[in-house]
Image (cartoon, grey):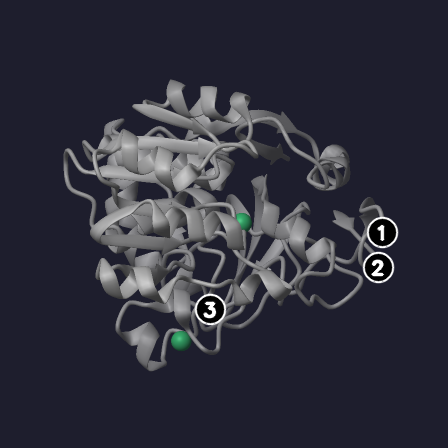
Amino acid sequence: MRAVVYEAVGAVPTVTEVPDPTCPDDGVVLDVAATGVCRSDWHAWRGHEQVALPHIPGHELAGTVREVGSAVSKWRVGDRVTVPFVLGCGTCEPCQAGDAQVCPNQEQPGFSLPGSFAERVALPRADANLVRLPDGLSFVAAASLGCRFATAYRAVVTHGAVRPGQWVAVHGCGGVGLSAVMVAKALGARVVAVDISTAALDAARDLGADAVVVADETTKVARAVRDLTDGGAHVSLDALGRAAVASAAIAGLRPRGRHVQVGLLHGDESRAAVSMRLVVARELAILGSHGMPAVDYPAMLELVTSGALDPERLVTRRIGLDDAGAALAEMDGPTPPGIAVIEL
Ligand SMILES: [Zn+2]
Ligand SMILES: [Zn+2]
């Protein structure tokens, strides 16, 4: 099969002929129909996360079941599916409690396993993790749900517990941030979007953001958010993953506010100083968000089917497998707003 492969950290990913994946007993092989290009793929390619080399990236995928392992009971050839980027083991305590996204024995296609920038991908643990697609949902829309949209949904709905009329500050308006703007607006919240890019903020406004803050060097972001929201946001998200962004987000919260850390921080950034003085004085909650388990997908898919959420609006570029390497490399610099999806 054809797959996008890189041989070394930072080496240009190229489309290569590789052996077809073998079907795990407890899993399936999928014909990949669409797969998103996510900043997490870029982080792994740049060596910020360990992957075995050579490596096939890709973890936001949708497709059709092509082969089914002997121990799988719920899935048949021809089923249209997507999958969370975290494959829980299905048997440990967090998995049993419905929290597969923090399974200590997790596997991740595109990180611990070969990913979906390929004609086919093997997915173990199918019964515990695959998600059936509603008939009307396109593969491209489904692929965009895989990581960024689902993560944003869970950050706003589950962790943020956002209620109508509350202020949500979304710091960083890339794929995950714009998804969060859409979800927060669907819940009836008011949204202030923050980014360094005016193009990203325009995209946020198009999705319903009530106010925007340009995070240039002169802007005191936390002050601007508190002014716009009459005393601070009820919920803030760092959808980018930077120490400075996380601290500004936390400082822009009102008393009893909730900060949800969505963006990944790497190296020294991950030891970012959180102002514990503020956390205590304002009784803030700081929550981490790591994807979304398969069991939480049906509620989100219902909102997509009803039209309350339209993830396909976030897809601004559709590319082929041959363009995937370049799309990954582009993330070295600022990228256009919205999500790029590879169609096969
Ligand atoms: Zn588990
Ligand atoms: Zn991702």
Question: Alpha-carbon distance for marks 3 and 2?
Answer: 29 Å
Q: Earlier in the sequence, mark 3 or mark 1?
A: 1
- The residue sitting at 25% across, 29% down in the picture is 308
Mark 3 closeness class: few <14, some 14–19, many ≥20 residues within 10 Å: many
Residue under label 1, please give it: 11
- The residue sitting at 62% across, 35% down in the picture is 342
Residue under label 2, please give it: 8
- The residue sitting at 62% across, 57% down in the picture is 110
Please give the label number shown on residue 96: none
Question: Alpha-carbon distance for marks 2 and 1?
Answer: 5 Å
Mark 2 in CB contact with mark 1 (< 8 angstroms)? yes
Residue under label 3, please give it: 125
| Residue type highlighted by circle 1 | Ala
**Residue 76 screen position, x and y as percent:** 43, 55
| Residue type highlighted by circle 2 | Ala
Mark 2, ligand 2, within 8 Å: the answer is no
**Residue 284 screen position, x and y as percent:** 25, 59
- Which of discs 3 and 1 lies nearer the camera? The answer is 1
Quadrant of the snapshot with the C terminus: top right
Quarter of the rendering containing residue 137 = top left
Disc 3 is placed on an element classified as loop
- Asked if residue 265 can be seen in this view, the reply is yes
Vertical placement of residue 26 versus 241, above or below:
below
- Asked if residue 65 can be seen in this view, the reply is no
Count of numbered circles in the view: 3
| Residue type highlighted by circle 3 | Arg
**Residue 261 screen position, x and y as percent:** 41, 55
Q: Is residue 270 left or right of residue 308?
A: right
Disc 1 is placed on an element classified as loop
Q: Earlier in the sequence, mark 3 or mark 2?
A: 2
